[in-house]
Image (spheres, grey):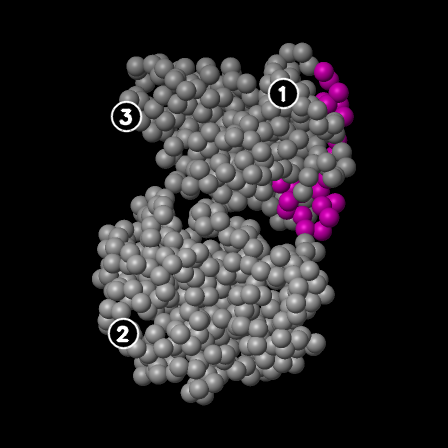
Amino acid sequence: MKLLTHNMLTSHVKGVTKGYPLLIKATEVKVNEVEFNPQFVSRMIPKLEWGALVQAAEELGHRQDLPGELVQDYEKNEDFLKKVHRVLLEVEVIEGCLQCPESGREFPISKGIPNMLLNEDEV
Amino acid sequence: MSCEEDGPSEQGPNSVGPCTSSSSETDAKSGDVITVTIGATVPTGFEHTAAEEVKEKIGVEARISKDRGRIYFPITTDKLFQVHLLRSVDNLFVVVEEYDHYQFKQSKEETLMELQQLASKLPWTNALEVWKLNGTLKKKKGHRKGGSTTKVKPNRNTADVAAADTEQQLHQVVSAAESHLEVDSAADAEPCEQDSQEAAPEARVIKFRVTCNRAGDKHSFSSNEAARDFGGAVQEFFQWKADMTKFDIEVLLNIHNEEMVIGIALTEESLHRRNISHFGPTTLRSTLCYGMLRLCKPQASDVILDPMCGTGAIPLEGAIEFSSSFYIAGDNNDMAVNRTVNNICHIQKRRADKGRISGLPIDTVQWDLCSLPIRTSSVDIIITDMPFGKRMGSKKKNWDLYPLCLREMARVCRPGSGKAVLLTQDKKCFAKAISRMGGLWRKLHTVWVNVGGLHAGVYLLKRTGAVFGQTPEDVHESRGMCNTQGDEKEDKELS
């Protein structure tokens, strides 16, 4: 699971109103090279929940020096865009789980695939 | 992969000179650049998309054979490699001759006799040149480590003969082709279809078959008869050997009413399954996936969801061909998500083997499509192959599933700019479901396609600007949905 995906995932357990962002507990993390496209990164940033991204990177120990707040004029800052690129697309959680911040319900991640299926009684 | 980048020895018996086009079709001297017509079969319904791709990647206008899944376009031999970059075509062939209004004789005997006579009169030379050239391109494609193991050695003898006479030219081309095949069997280290104990190079004869497709109700003959008789005459003329399974050259005889096209195949197996190594019960061919993706015109940074991804064919094609977007493939089924991940890994490994950066902008999640664990209004495009009810699911299930799907997809899709491209065979059910969603989805365009013999529709929808939770449609209760109060509150929190 890449952190870009994590940024979009939310808990949908019945009754939960604050299901985002999901907490990550990773037991295996990999870094895979993906081709850098600055336009992709700079256009993606406004679509992200920046705080959640930084928090997730932190949880995985891959935050490096990503700022807590977005810098100004980041579109032109290639160094910054490369860092964001790495965190969004290259860092992957292979094994672990995602946890709903409100209910505590855990969703397992296995072979890089988060299983977000709910049981009958949770729907 | 460009002809210009490689040394002359890898291109065939002769080096191709500077790319000045000598577009005379009668000049078939080996080494000159010639213009030929290429035919391509494409998924029916996506002819325009394919023509667009040809315009974009090759820069020429393609002619469309409407509703019959074929397009035609001209190309010069120095650019032949470009046809292999096309993602919307299933099969490629080079046209030997085309007749728009061929007058078939009344009787079967006369017609077949005429076909036989035709074999020796057709302008084979250029098409065979292209077939030969294409063979060398494919060899290069097949090798991952620099392509040095199977160079086609120049055969200077046949090349230097400047033939004035067509027949001599023809035999020159054919024997050059034979020598190209000699080198194949001698130097090819990879396991190949041909029997390794095949005859010594000198005795190597070209094997061929004729495939005939015939449509129309005024013909006095069947496709088998035409293939047989035409094939017999071809065999006689070239002294090739007929072999239905292990052939080097496939001659195509396509007849549609008064139109007749004779061609030589440039693709061995259909290109449509190129990305998938782990198939599922309803895996879509990649050319169809490509057509659907082109329809929604993915932009840089678009977040593209396939909520019923099956083996991941659509998002994977997207991640490869429209790689400036991000794809999330999801399914509720264990086997499906595993196959998707396996297919992705397979492609990544193939890229790594070629020395390319292997990572793709794609991820896989296991989820229930009626309750997507995705933030509201965060997706730009939804593209999927919806269960048909015949091979997967059932018609009754679709009745309930489609409205729920459409509603959930509307929730996650960005209002105003979002789009959906949905393939389904259950047109009635879909039409009904969409008619009740006018506040959320608007139909822009429909492409009618043929999927495994079933008539299906690809619907291009636009997400309206309406905010989810406020249109009359989505306030309506349906079985299995969370109560709307909870939804609205959650939506406001997250948006």
Give the secondary structure at mark 3.
loop
User: Which mark lies nearer to you, 1 or 2?
Assistant: 2
Say if mark 1 contacts mark 2, CB within 8 Å. no
Q: Residue at x 60, y 18 (%)?
A: B25
Is residue B161 within the magenta segment? yes
Towards the viewer: A94 or B61: B61
Q: Is residue B113 visible?
A: yes
Q: Work out which quarter of the rendered image holds the C terminus of chain B and state it.
A: bottom left
Between discs 1 and 3, the one toward the N terminus: 1
Towards the viewer: B68 or A16: A16
Image position, residue B75 (x, y; %): 58, 29
- Identify which amino acid the numbered label 3 is placed on: Asp
Q: Which residue is mark 3?
A: B217
Q: Is residue B208 visible?
A: no
Q: Work out which quarter of the rendered image holds the N terminus of chain B and state it.
A: top right
Q: Which residue is mark 1?
A: B23
Give the secondary structure at mark 2.
loop
